[in-house]
Image (spheres, rainbow, N blue to C red):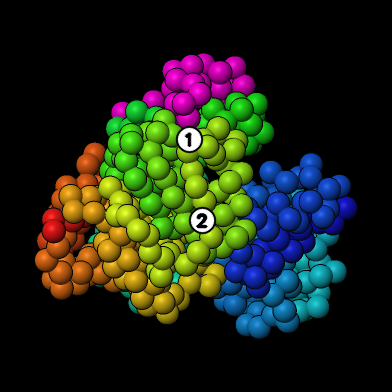
Amino acid sequence: MKPIEVVVAEVITEVELRKLSLRGVMEDYFSRYRELSVIKGVVRAFALAVLRNFKLLDYIASNVLGVERVGGVLLRNILRATIYEVLFRNVDVSRVSRVLPYLSKIGIKLRDLLKVRDVDVNSMISRIGDVVERLSIKYSQPTWVVKYLLNLLGDAECERLLARFNEPATLWIRVNTTKVSRRRLMRLLAKRGVETIEDPDLPDVLRVVKYGINLSHVPEYHRGYFHIQDKASALVTHVLSPKRKSYVVDLCAAPGGKSTHIAQITRCRCTLLSLDWSRKRLQALRNVSERLGVSHGILPILCDSRYISFRRKFDYVLVDPDCSSLGKLGHSPEIRLWITPDIVRKHREMQMQLLLRGIELLKTGGVLVYSTCTFTLEENEVLLKEILESRDDVELVEAEPKIGLPGLYGLSTAQRLYPHIHDTTGFFIAKLRKIK
């Protein structure tokens, strides 16, 4: 069997080169190497740890081992995984020896790796004078992200957020109340060894506090009793609060978390059009809706929502577009490997187009909810202010239930959720009403 460090490195390398999610790459990897499935859980935890510390690991490689350049992405990730294991897991020397045939290509010997064990990380980092560089290395975040968050939140709050990003993300599930009550699901999961707590804010959300198995493997998951969905994401649909017998359009519907939640809340008694540009993602929505038993309440449509038009106007419009995903830097740390400021500018243009199209599809008196899983002003408050100042047919209203902090730039009726404060993915949620 391959050394686990190599397996982890192969997974991370595929993530890095193809800019794909860790979850998706792992599913594909272990479907190809079924003989390794016994270590899948360990590999995922190991890979997450390496991704949450990759800049720190590179800094140690450079400043302790003198390795400035590594020939190839795979070899660099093997080195990262090995340094992490030596420094943070205190493994036996014989374990490390298994990767030396790989690392010898860059001149690394066992005595070099043993130096890593004695590194005082806090002392080493404290000697970095520039605060942005220091926080970037300590928490393994892109320097531009650190600088942005420092300007947005200030020193103390920024560091608390960065620290939270490097801790395991809280696991939330949405109860499918069309099939089971929240209390009954709690009892059923308890029999599987899964301990949950009722969320005090949202009536169909549970916080998972203890589990020893993959939740997607329990029978209740396959019966469609629940959906793995972050609390902040579930909040979006409650803010929309669609009514039965209404007309609803979700402009960025796949992979289906919010569309299926709309169908759940309305008991499939609304007309719901779920639009997405990706055939593959739309198939994921179909699969989720079938598992949850709400497929009869959703009409999936493959299209570019920016250019779609309909004969009628809608009571509710949901715009939850692709974004820079800074709110997921803890939940999906692989994003750190490739995210750049250009991504913010690229998404902002698309978000503006989707918002304007959403407003056009809305009837007078109708409600539009706009949400992103990012913190940037450009994709949130600045974008909305530009629309509000250029149009007289929409107004910003209170985004309730109010769980997050008030929006910035005077948009206090919107809300922001932060991982270190609300124990969720980072989110922005705003609610508009069409007034003419």
The type of residue carrying mark 2 is Ile
Name the side, left or right, on which 341 lies relative to 2.
left
The type of residue carrying mark 1 is Ile
Determine the secondary structure under disc 2: strand
Residue at 40 percent across and 33 percent down: it is: 269
Residue receiving disc 1: 173
Q: Residue furthest front?
A: 311
* For residue 319, above or below residue 211: below
Q: Earlier in the sequence, mark 1 or mark 2?
A: 1
Q: Is residue 145 visible?
A: no
Front-lying residue, 282 or 16? 282
Front: mark 1 or 2: 2
- How much space separates mark 1 and mark 2, taking CA atoms? 26 Å
Examine the structure image and report whether residue 285 is included in the region drawn in magenta.
no
Counting from the top left corner in percent of width and height, residue 159 is at 34, 59
Location of the C terminus (image quadrant): bottom left
Residue receiving disc 2: 301
Q: Is residue 239 visible?
A: yes
Examine the structure image and report whether residue 176 is included in the region drawn in magenta.
yes
Q: Which residues are magenta?
A: 175-200
